[in-house]
Amino acid sequence: MTTHITGTRVWLTESGVTGFLARGEKDVYRISKSTTGARAVSVRALPGGGNTLLPVLCVGPYVDPSGPPVEDEPGMAPTWTASVPARCADRATTYPLPEGESYVLVFHDDGQPDDATPDPNDRIKLGDSVQYVLELQY
């Protein structure tokens, strides 16, 4: 099993990559469908790695940050097309891989308020975390 440090952007090349997520965190990986031969990627919580947070995935095509920006207005910082929307609408525990290179985002929905003021009655506490494993589906 390969383990990585939370918050890093690494290439996902094999099954068994593990990580930890705490409240408000996400992990980002890059993957190539042609290099891995995988048709999909899945995530699941590991036993004993926390039970109040459920990891989910979102996959989006790789956007080359050294390519031309989509918007480049005078006096404004250039912007590129985002690979994955800020709030992924079609998150899942198993996600098909598009052709080419992609980003894989691992995150959880629990305790994620849409504003800067968390609900004091929220059952998710700041110290909660989950350990997950990513598996490639062939």
Image: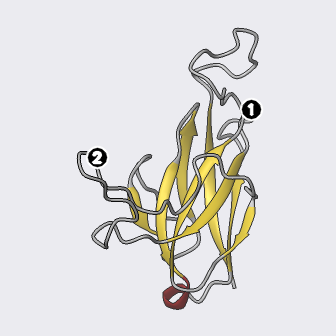
**Residue farthest left in this picture:** 75
Quadrant where the image shows the C terminus: bottom right
Q: Which residue is at 73% across, 53% downward?
A: 89
Dots 2 and 1: beta carbons under 8 Å?
no
User: In the image, is 120 to the left or to the right of 85?
Assistant: right
Q: Which residue is at 48% across, 88% downward?
A: 35
Task: From the top left corner, tell me how far across and down residue 116 is, in percent.
Answer: 56, 20
Relative to 26, is 64 above or below?
below
**Residue farthest front in this picture:** 74
Type of the residue with mark 1: Thr
Question: From mark 2 to mark 1, how far is it between C-alphas?
Answer: 41 Å
Q: Which residue is at 67% across, 52% downward?
A: 88
Nearest the eye: 45 or 39: 39
The mark lying in front, picked from 2 and 1, is 2
In primary-sequence order, the first of circles 2 and 1 is 1
Nearest the eye: 4 or 88: 88
Task: From the top left corner, tell me how far across and down residue 46 is, in percent.
Answer: 68, 50
Question: Badge 1 is on which residue?
Answer: 52
Looking at the rendering, which quadrant does residue 50 occupy? top right
Nearest the eye: 15 or 93: 93
SS for callout 1: loop
Relative to 38, is 103 above or below?
above
The image's colour scheme reads secondary structure
Could you tell me if residue 46 is visible in this image? Answer: no
Relative to 15, is 6 above or below?
above
SS for callout 2: loop
Mark drawn on residue 103: none
Mark drawn on residue 76: 2
User: In the image, is 16 to the left or to the right of 69?
Assistant: right
Specify few, some or many for label 2: CA neighbours under 10 Å numbering under 14, 14-19, or 20 or more: few
Q: Which residue is at 27% across, 70% downward?
A: 66
Type of the residue with mark 2: Met
